[in-house]
Image (cartoon, coloured by chain):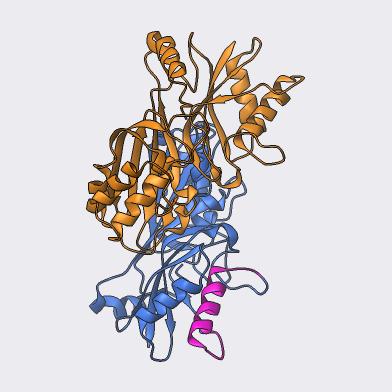
Chain colours: A blue, B orange
Amino acid sequence: MRLRIDLAYDGAAFHGWATQPGLRTVQGEIETAIATVMRLPALASLTVAGRTDTGVHARAQVAHVDLDEVDPVVLTRRLQRVLPADISIREVTEAVEGFDARFAALERRYIYRLCDTIPDPLTRGTVVTHRRPLDVDAMNAASTHLLGEHDFASFCKKREGATTIRELRELASVRTGGRIETTVRADAFCHSMVRSLMGALVAVGEGRHDPTWAGEILAGGTRDARVRVMPAHGLTLEEIVYPPDHLLAARVAQSRRRRDDPR
Amino acid sequence: MRLRIDLAYDGAAFHGWATQPGLRTVQGEIETAIATVMRLPALASLTVAGRTDTGVHARAQVAHVDLDEVDPVVLTRRLQRVLPADISIREVTEAVEGFDARFAALERRYIYRLCDTIPDPLTRGTVVTHRRPLDVDAMNAASTHLLGEHDFASFCKKREGATTIRELRELASVRTGGRIETTVRADAFCHSMVRSLMGALVAVGEGRHDPTWAGEILAGGTRDARVRVMPAHGLTLEEIVYPPDHLLAARVAQSRRRRDDPR
């Protein structure tokens, strides 16, 4: 049976989501925990919706795992008991027919948090302090040059054989108190894409470039060293959007056809 | 000249506010930093509005210090540069005539944060996870038996010669999402008073006692072992209220007359 796992984590003490030998990762911790509480002879592999990098947080991550018959309520409770405090299993449920955490997802939503005034020490784990004042209007003007379906190669670490074409649906910054929150939505993201987009917005927000500069970088088509990859701890995966149940299978087939490594 | 220091801190890695030999405290860190950047031959002593215990946070703490002539803007910048990330100096300003961080304060406001559902790992440093569901209406019913001016000896660690009479002005719990936030306002607090009040509310919220039980504990008049002192990390000092400038001196005189160790 396929299980859907809804979870959250504080990325600070993890080398990202994906299992790496000898390193503490979210996937590694959960796969080990499942094997322990289910007394499995080997690890059962998790598939995730949004593979987060080292230090990136998730408030609403989704993964799936295929296991022999198990009571999801019991598994939820047992995982909550054995997992460390920086991972929180919200719920384990039996996945509906056709569900695939990665390929069925329609959209990933992240928020990047910046503070350009006096930092709040109580939120310093999820908010990046920026020492220069930022012009949010200029940042949003830059965003207009990035929205839509484009090849985001300029903002990605390239992976062999994977497309870097993505549909960026929202890149909206708002100031709340001394903090700036940028919501970023796309069908999927390439490696380090959100943090690179933020690097471009921050360069414009500081007044170092005009808003149109973001569009020039995009048009360049190859990774540009002038774009700073912003720190990981300001980034939190906030939502994964799936289609209604009866459209899951079609969405999975469509994603797989594009062979585009959606993350 | 007297300087007013507005600051915030994450209490997790401090043995509370007050200097203790060999232990890391907020007062110790700041006094050392002031002596360093001002090149003082000895530490200048800070006076604080709300002396917080080990692990308690502050988002809007106020302290004062008396120093020789100094530019507050320069001192602010230098302190921000040398202090660690878990202390944030919001602003150092020249105090108005008659100001005293401790004795001039009219009111201290704290918030205690609890989560009785699935915890958010990103806020686990400031929110206490409680494993049983809490009835917020029952908690607020209990609060009605505690509000007003009373001897709060049942909820305090007694200090020789100090009164435990306090005026509790607000003790209001609200549920926001899976979280319960309790706002606590009083003219001043005794040692561990907020966390003991919360212990009483939680006992009622769990259904272990009727709301009237809180009033019985209060009437008991001595520290009661049945009242749990709730964990420190759920507590944050959110505000210190001062009178208008022309009433500062009168307030200081009044506080000193009461000799009641306001904190």
Asked whether A102 falls inside the magenta stretch, the response is no
Which is nearer the eye, A67 or B172?
B172
What residue occupies the far right of the structure in this picture? B41
Q: Main secondary structure of the magenta part?
A: helix
Q: Where does the image place residue A22, in percent across and percent down from the top left?
A: 68, 72
The structure residue drawn at horizontal position 38% and vertical position 87%, both measured from the top left corner, is A70
For residue A202, side relative to residue B198 (left or right)? right
Question: Is residue A139 shown to the viewer in this render?
Answer: no
Q: Residue at 50% across / 31% down in the picture?
A: A133
Query: In what quadrant of the picture does the N terminus of chain B appear?
Result: top right
Q: As displayed, is residue B94 above or below residue B164? A: above
Regarding residue B153, the answer to whether it shows in the image is yes
Instruction: Work out whether residue A188 or residue A118 is closer to the camera in this orientation and state it.
Output: A118
Residue B54 in percent (x, y) is at: 56, 44
In this rendering, would A146 be left or right of B67? left
Up the image or down, B205 lies above or below A212; here it is below
Q: Is residue A237 placed above or below B44 in the rendered structure? A: below
**Measured from the top left, where is residue B213 in percent x and y?**
28, 51
User: Is B107 situated above or below A246?
Assistant: above
List x then y, in percent, for residue A234. Answer: 51, 49
Residue B236 location, quadrant? top left
Question: Which segment is the magenta one?
Answer: A23-43
